[in-house]
Structure formats: C-alpha cells, structure tokens
Amino acid sequence: MYRTILVPLDGSAAAERALPHAEALATATGARLLLVRATPADPTSPTDPNAEQTRTVREVEAYLAGAAAQLTRCSVIETAVFSGEAAHAILEESRLRSVDLVAMATCRDSVLGQCVYGEVAEAVLAQSPVPLLLVRACQAEPQPIPLDRRPRVLVPLDGSTFAEEALPAAECMAQTIDGELVLLHVVQPPRRARLADSASAASPADTRHVALLEHELEVLKSEARDYLQQVAAWWASGSGTLHLDVRVGEPSETIAAAVREHQAAVVALATHGRTGLSRLLLGSVADSVLQHSSVPLLLVRPSAMRRAV
C-alpha cells in the first residue's frame, strides 16, 4: 500500500493533471501527499540575488499551499521547495521522504513547455527507485481513478521475466483501489499468416496452407493461455481477482482495444529506464495509451536496472 505519494508541479495547469489521480490514491489509502516544486538554482538579478531567491521561494510556497488547499479529500498534505534542476529535486525528495509512488504529468503529442513532462519525465523515469504513475497532461479534463467500482489494472505480458517485473506494482495498485488485475498476452500472427490472409485460397494447396497457418496460430494461443495460467498460479495471493486475456493482433492496437473493453483504470508496464519513454517496453503501446486515452501508465524499472544506477 502507498504511504507517501509525490506529485511534481511547476505552476502549470498541465502539470496539475496528475493531482486528481494522486488525490484518489491518497484518499483510498490515507497516504501522505507530497507536492514538490523546484526553483532555479541561480537567481537572475545582478543586484540582490538573495532577495530575488527569497521572493521566488515565497511565491512557490504560496502556489503549493494553494494547490494543497484544493485537495480537500486528503488528510495529510505536505509541500517542499527545492532549488535546482527539477528531475534531480524529484529523485532526491523521493529518496529522502521514502516515497512509494511518483505521480506526474507528461505529454507525448506536444512540444516541450513549462509543464513537468518531456525531458523531466524521462529523466525521472530513467532513475526513479519507485514506480511512476504517468498521466497524460494534454487532455481537456483529467478523469481520476474511479473508486466507486472495481477498477481494473491491465498488465501486458510478453512471456519475458522483464515484463513480469511490473506485476508487484500492478498488484499494489489493484489492492490500493480495491480493483482487479487483468493479465494480457497478445499473440502476433506469423508474418506468412498475415500475408496469406490477404490472398484468396483459390487452390487446394492454398487451402492446406491456410489450414496449417490457422493450426499454428491456435498452438500459439494455447501456449499463451498456458503461460498466463502459470503466471496466475505463481502470482495469485488469494487477495484479489485475476482475469486472463489472450488476443491476436498487433500489440499497440490490440492492447489499446483491451484497455477500452476492460475499462481499465491503469496500464502497468516495465521499462528499460535508459532514456525514458523512447525505451519503454512496448513503447508504441505506451505512446498510444498516452495519446489516445486518459488512462494513466504505471511504469516500473526492473530491479536489475535499479541496481545498475
């Protein structure tokens, strides 16, 4: 369960898109909500830099206090002002305050601006010791994680232990929101099957070829179901509901469809964490979720990656 949730802010409405999600999680668990904003390390005033820095800090403190005042459902809210580079401040505060989750906004279909996204989000993701809840900033109205029903956390798995590293964070999220886990495996048809699908089976040889391809696809689907059942048997703790879903198609489109059909509240993914979003496992899927829906991503850096930092 979450005890401390950190939300980086920069004074923009876009960055504040993460607040409804963080507030919902903090309300569900009684977690402490920590609002953080960084200020420039070097004052620009040549006459009295100390006075300018003091004024800037007071303005930032007033802004954070105003943001905290809007979160009426949270019982414990703290604020912190750091001097220096934003990503460093976020990571340092995460370590100092034993943060369990960082919730922040990003935007994948806009140029970099004043919002906490882009380079800052990627820098935090590349080094964060805790899961990162990434919310799309460029949407008209943020929809907080629903707590009035059994929301679902979708976990795309590809058969690798790397992808399975998202499971602990996904289970924690599901327990926090009293939700359910959906384990999804997308089977990609063999390339020759995709080619054959576009051609007509005009001859007996073509018919036999199509039948062989269909049989091969059924074998792949059966193996995928067996894999998910093994993961479920190994992972299930008896504390929640697990759904298994095997689908055929291209990963990006198929997972996006699963998000809609399951009405998933969160999608959990493991990430390489080397250069941020460009290195996401199933990165095109992550971009698709961020660009075409309001569903946040729960991103996890595998333990081997964290030890390497």
Image (spheres, rainbow, N blue to C red):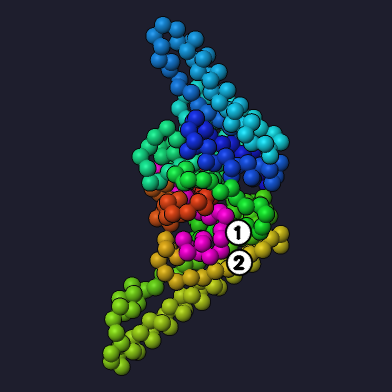
Image quarter for residue 41? Answer: top left
Q: Is residue 211 visible?
A: yes
**Magenta segment: does it hold 138?**
no
Q: Point out the tag, 2 or 1, that comes first from the N-terminus.
A: 1
Question: Residue 64 occupies which quadrant of the picture?
Answer: top right
Viewed as shown, does residue 68 lie left or right of 54? right
Residue ranking furthest to the bottom:
204
Residue 209 at what x, y percent from top left? 33, 86
Q: Is residue 123 visible?
A: no
Q: Secondary structure at mark 1?
A: strand
On the image, the x and y values in percent for residue 86 come to 47, 30
Q: Secondary structure at mark 2?
A: strand
Residue at image coords 58%, 68%: 244
Q: Are marks 2 and 1 in contact (CB under 8 Å)?
A: yes
Other residues around mark 2 within 10 Å, as few (<14) / some (14–19) / many (≥20):
some
- Residue range in magenta is 255-275
- Distance from disc 2 to disc 1, alpha carbons, whole Å, reads 9 Å
- The residue under label 2 is 243
What amino acid type should be assigned to the residue bearing mark 1? Arg
Q: Classify 225 as above or below 92.
A: below
Please count the marks in the image.
Answer: 2
Q: Position of residue 31 (x, y in %)?
A: 68, 40
Question: In the rendered view, would you say 197 is above or below 93?
Answer: below
Q: Nearer the viewer, residue 180 or 276?
A: 180
The residue located at (49%, 31%) in the rendering is: 10
- Hey, what amino acid is under mark 2? His
Answer with the quarter of the image where residue 133 lies.
Answer: top right
Residue receiving disc 1: 152
Nearer to us in this view, 239 or 116: 116
